[in-house]
Amino acid sequence: MKFLCVNAGSSSLKFQLFEMPEEKVIISGYIEKIGLEDSFWTTKINGEKIKGAKYLKNHSEAVEVLLNELLENKAVKSLDEIKGVGHRVLHGGEKYSDSVIITDEVIQDIRDLTKLGPLHHPGNLAGIEALKEVLPDVPMVAVYDTAFHQTMPKENYLYPVPYEWYLKYGVRKYGFHGTSHKYITTVMKEKLGKKDVNLIICHIGSGASISAIKDGKCFDTTMGITPLDGLMMGTRSGSIDPSILEYVCKESGESISDVTNALNKKSGLLGVSGFSDSRDVENAAASGDERAILALNMYNDRVAKYIADYYIELKGEVDAIVFTAGVGENGIAAREEIIERLKPLGITVDKALNSLIASFKDKHEGLISGKDSKVDVYVIPTNEELMIIKDTYNLVCNK
Amino acid sequence: MKYLTIRTNNNSFSFGLYEDKSIICSGFIKGMKSDEGFMEINYNNKKEKENLTLTDNDSSKQLLDKLVSLGIINSYLDIRAIGFKVLGHSQDNHLMITDKLLDEIKEMDYSAYEVISSFNRYSNITKIAVFDGSFFNTISEVNYLYPVYYSWYTNYNLRKNGFGGLRIRSIISKLGKDYNDGKIVFCDLDKDTLITAVDNLKCIDTSNIMSVRYSGSIDPSIIPYMMEREGKNASEVVNELKNNCGLVGLSSYYDVGTIMEQCQMLDDRAVAAKDRYVMEIVKYIAQYYVLLGGLDTVVFTGNISLDYSFIRREICEKLSILGIKLDLDLNSNNDNDFQIISSKDSKINIITSSCDEDSVILDDIMKYINR
């Protein structure tokens, strides 16, 4: 049975077609610059990359390209073979604590939640609607990036702000990267052979969030009402003193939305070092660039601080710390730096083991903590698409 | 020789008058620049109160004239020097106030500037600025920079500033030599919640976190989000985050006394607010434990620390995995202004201490005079 995973952004659309229940990827692709004259796409099948380009006015035209790619590359003989589509959706609010079959009500809810996901929901909706148009009889599933975090207790999801802000406007921590945190939790349950795992999961890529998992469920996470909260990231500041916005507006004469935009797109590693890609920052730091070194130290400090927070929140009862996503899977130096900062908690790194694991090496996952470490530390590659498809498959096939 | 110490705060200031190192009298003036001013002077176990008109920025004259009329000083010339607390930092802990320095103080601490200006009529008295923020000069770039656009720091000097430096310095002078080379976290729980990491008497980092009324660091997106929901401007929302959040915002009770009382009566919302407050403090102590590479001493100061032994108990309980352990008897019988309250088998010393900023200002005056 074939299932399609779709991640539609405001101007891009990623897709993967899976054979289920084998969990095998048949074809994948990435369509970029939708709505711009120079739209283009890359499709991958059997290790081969195929490129295409043509002006794509909107998401409907992008979906036409997607289906064409499936047919032309003989990933499917006919579109009837697609038994379900899983859509990544940013925000499920408080209503959705799990993935759900898309109905008119679900679409309306996603539309209503645009206020909490203004940058993502218009693209998510356009993707869903375009696919519904061409595949009207295929069941579709919404997989929310926030859903996994809905098990957080109130004491952890409330902000210390007027309680009415929560009641009236939904001001609370929702958390993001839920699909990834859920995937890693599922993998770790199997690996450790127990259901009630306590974990600290560091999903650190260009976006970054850390979750505390207690008894197999999300107990706390660093991202908040939006993905800007928590850790310093590739281009985001993370949580900061709220006076900063007002101060910068006043000093620079910029508007609040300019400053918020800068906190999302020009801050973090990019803001401090001048380099947005973490590999570029690491290269610059290696060649002695002071601002790059400073930026990395700030970044690693913050990851270590949140791990310490969650170690205490979990009362020290932590089965494993897991690194995943771009930096977590490939940042050998970053992992070493972060774990070394945790030495006062008795957590240590085995530098040799750590240096062997990365997506560009033979070994992609495994244990990296020292023998004497109080807590085991692992690298586990995340796979959000697979999680989306598993949820879709389970819902569509009533498993 | 007599010395005067002055600490200003929004149209009011408090003062202490010292003969060498002993306090002779203390008090405050409120309602500066208004016709509803008020002065209180405590001396010889007596309390002198007076309503004043202070529209002419002459609070200094009214105070010194009063001290003369009460016979506490013969003339203003008895006062050798005045030390003013200034919120801001300089390369030094204290500096003599010149016209040039006064201009700089105007930028950092306007209410101190106004009071200092009022005392400028007494040109014979040496005036010294004692900078609250200088204690934090040793914080390194990696800790004082925010993870934002770098030019906001270079162009607008946006960086973390420390507060409560004089309070910490006053406790350090009580700690004595045994603690000089230690790793210490100061938990100053008062109107503000200030957590400060110190190693070898040097400040390493400080954080101004969730307090009675302030939210602490949050997702900055909340500001534009709330502006849109409530049709407010940025400073209105930021004001709410500074003044209506924290313990008060979460619990919906108005002051810390009521919140703590309601906690004892197990009111849900008060308990939830208090639990969050305790957890935020715990997290920062844990972060500084990691940053400092271990911890020798935790010092509790500030009114909330000193008035509510159960807050200290809950904080320490949550940190027990770090080997911190209270002596519960010492903790609940705490009326000392400096007391060790950790149990003998605790890996980390726990101390309660009051603070006395005036004593630090006085020390700095003496250091300047005897330089």
Image (cartoon, coloured by chain):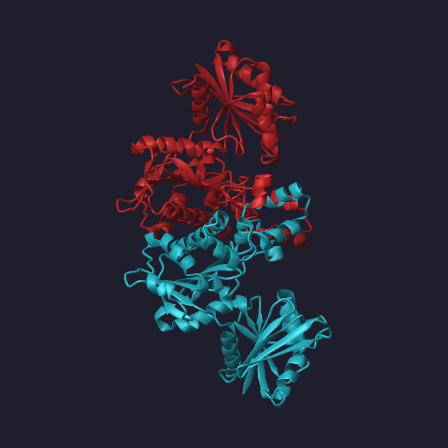
Quarter of the image with the N terminus of chain B is: bottom right
How many marks are shown on the rendered structure?
0
Residue A112 screen position, x and y as percent? 61, 30
Residue B152 screen position, x and y as percent? 60, 53
Left or right side of B333 for B99: right
Residue A172 screen position, x and y as percent? 53, 41
Q: Colour of chain A?
A: red
Q: Image quadrant of residue B49?
A: bottom right
* Residue in front for this viewpoint, A115 or A33: A115
Inspect this view and state whether residue B136 appears.
yes
Residue A386 screen position, x and y as percent? 43, 25
Q: Is residue B275 above or below residue A55?
A: below
Q: Is residue A135 above or below residue A150?
A: above
* Residue plotted at (63% across, 52% down): A246
Q: Image quadrant of residue A352?
A: top left
Q: Colour of chain B?
A: cyan
* Residue plotted at (45% across, 29% down): A384
Name the residue at the left extreme. Answer: A371
* Residue in front for this viewpoint, B179 or B241: B241
Q: Is residue A120 above or below residue B257?
A: above
Name the residue at the front extreme. Answer: B265
Q: Is residue B326 above or below residue A24?
A: below
Inspect this view and state whether residue A293 appears.
no
